[in-house]
Amino acid sequence: MIQLRGVSKTVMSGDHALTILHPLDLTIADGQFLAIVGPSGSGKSTLLGLLAGLDAPTTGSILVGGVDITRLSEDGLAKLRGAQIGFVFQFFHLVPSLTALENIMVPMEIAGRRDAMARGRQLLDEVGLAERGHHYPSQLSGGEQQRVAIARALANDPPIILADEPTGNLDSTTGRHILDLLLNVRRERRTTMVLVTHDLELAALADERLVLRDGRPVDARVEVPR
Ligand code: ADP
Ligand code: MG
């Protein structure tokens, strides 16, 4: 379970403080699929980054499996992230100097798994790229790179998958395939999934929707302009 209590984020913008996420309470049950929607600049990525412990909130607490991640050291946070959270980014964020297989192996090597290569190959197969393990990101299409990124996110079998507009940089057909892959992953592994998306059709498939505007939740029945 993920629990946010009074979580907010204020940043300095020039010489004044700017609150980009207003105090938010949110509970995400194990296995839940939550879609976060809202116009550009509404605080979606900020919230996802806080959930992942990639960024620290200005106020509030974030409990992941009962652990308040805002109280963890950098090291403790990195360990928790490595074991519990798989993150999929809009722009893939693969390491360009590593092959597809090597990219997938990174989180497993950090976790000290001896079966990293065998499992990496299995994950490549699972995302439909069994033959592409030796290719570098620059030799792969956007959709293929995102498949590698999804395999990497699954490497340590995290109970939580966070995805920030994972199809935002792909054409609609490729995006559809990537979404199907994510939905399959979620169904088969019963992971908690938090997905930031502009796609209202996709958001409709989620168990729950959080609509943000100007860093605040708005009534989910209000239609969100794209
Ligand atoms: P979204 O993902 O919904 O498009 P973001 O969470 O990326 O929105 O950003 C919310 C708002 O906060 C935007 O207006 C953005 O420009 C601003 N913002 C995000 N991070 C910072 C920062 N570090 N400093 C100043 N402004 C920021
Ligand atoms: Mg964003």
Image (cartoon, grey):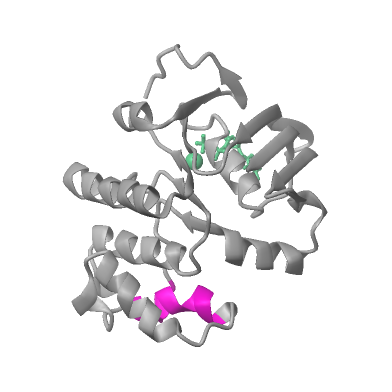
Q: Identify the residue shown where x is 27% and y is 64%.
A: 127
213 or 51, nearer to the observer: 51
The residue that appears at 31% across and 50% down in the rendered structure is: 184
Quarter, ligand 1: top right
Q: Is residue 63 visible?
A: yes
Residue beneath the point at 29% across and 52% down: 181
Position of the N terminus by quadrant: top right
Magenta residues (range): 95-109
> How many callouts does the rendering have?
0
Quarter of image, res 13:
top right
Image coords of residue 54 (percent x, y): 64, 55
| Residue 99 visible in the displayed image | no
Residue 131 sits in quarter: bottom left
Is residue 134 shown left or right of residue 189? left
Q: Position of residue 164 (x, y in %)?
A: 46, 46
Q: Is residue 86 magenta?
A: no
**In screen coordinates, is 202 left or right of 41?**
left
In the picture, measured across the screen, residue 165 lies left or right of residue 48, that is left
Q: Where residue 36 sits in the image (x, y, percent)?
A: 48, 33
Q: Position of residue 204 (x, y in %)?
A: 35, 26
The answer to if 105 sits in the magenta stretch is yes
Which sits in the foreground, 153 or 216? Answer: 153
Q: Is residue 170 above or below residue 103?
A: above
